[in-house]
Image (cartoon, rainbow, N blue to C red):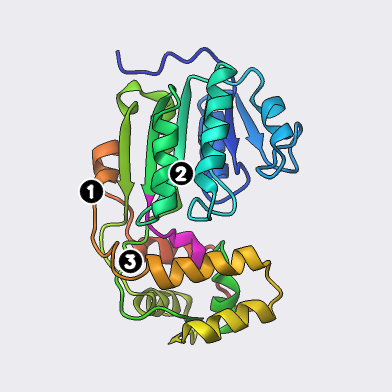
Amino acid sequence: MTAFQHDMKPILILGGTGKTGRRIADQLAAQGLPVRIGSRAARPSFDWENRASWAPSLEGVGAVYISYYPDLAAPGAAEVIGAFADLAVGLGVKRLVLLSGRGEPEAQRAEERVRQSGADWTVLRCSWFMQNFSEGFVLDAVMAGEVALPVGAVGEPFIDADDIADVAVAAFTDNRHIGQLYELTGPRLLTFAEAIAEIATVAGRDIRFVEIGAADFKAGLAAAQLPRDFVELLMMLFTEVLDGRNEHVVDDVSRALGRAARDFTDYAKNAAAAGIWAEAQ
């Protein structure tokens, strides 16, 4: 018997309105499982920076999807995740599924804290989301026709957020995923320039990629009046994590789901067909 012996307690989805969280919540709800969204706008409200909000959101919960804001790569994230996981287990939560990142030392420390919590755990260690180009911070640049980033010809195995959601849902509904660390990547490597070229082709638009220096990138972020902590996080992700350390593909989507990971070309075609990158009329 591999099916999760679900006691019908709610599954708390932290970041439940984000790229992966809302997909997971929709799938679980479609299966008739009770879902609670964890966000500042939810009731009860959940805020990573307000620890007093954690316990009310966890009350009566049986499992949690942990998506940390702004990112597990941020300094101090592991301590926050550890404190949350310990509280969750203390309040009766049985299962934790953690969204993590590849090649990020702080994220790997957070994974260890979840493993030590005493909960049944699953870790999803993910590459860069394809949806960053259609739902994330790169979208504005794509729409403007020029994506300028401080990254060169480094291959990244972009992962579809739908694949992440599928694995997360499997982890909540099938006991064979307990104690598994899945490294989730797409099926092939693309540079950012190649990814933008594919988007330009399917969108039928002139969109170009420009490699810029780290100092210019940082200056642009500061000019956009982004929070200092977020600027520092993006700088670290682009100048350290994208140094080639993740330049390889892993078949853990197949190991978890028994099918291949979605390809970037299919993602781009679907996003273009949905009008995501269409020019305003």
Q: Which mark is residue 99?
A: 2
The Cα atoms of the two marked residues, 1 and 3, are separated by 14 Å
Instruction: Report whether residue 3 is seen.
Output: yes
Q: Nearer the viewer, residue 149 or 29?
A: 149
Q: Is residue 132 magenta?
A: yes
Q: Which mark is residue 251?
A: 1
The Cα atoms of the two marked residues, 3 and 2, are separated by 18 Å
Q: Nearer the viewer, residue 59 or 257?
A: 59
Q: Which mark is residue 77?
A: none
Looking at the image, residue 224 lies above or below residue 105: below
Instruction: Give the SS element for disc 1.
Output: loop
Which residue sits at x=33%, y=54%?
262
Callout 3 amino acid? Glu
Instruction: Give the SS element for disc 3.
Output: loop
Q: Position of residue 11 (x, y in %)?
A: 56, 26
Q: Say few, some or many: other residues with alpha carbon within 10 Å of mark 3 (under 14 / 14 to 19 / 20 or more).
A: many
Residue where numbered disc 3 is placed: 156
What range is drawn magenta here?
Answer: 126-133
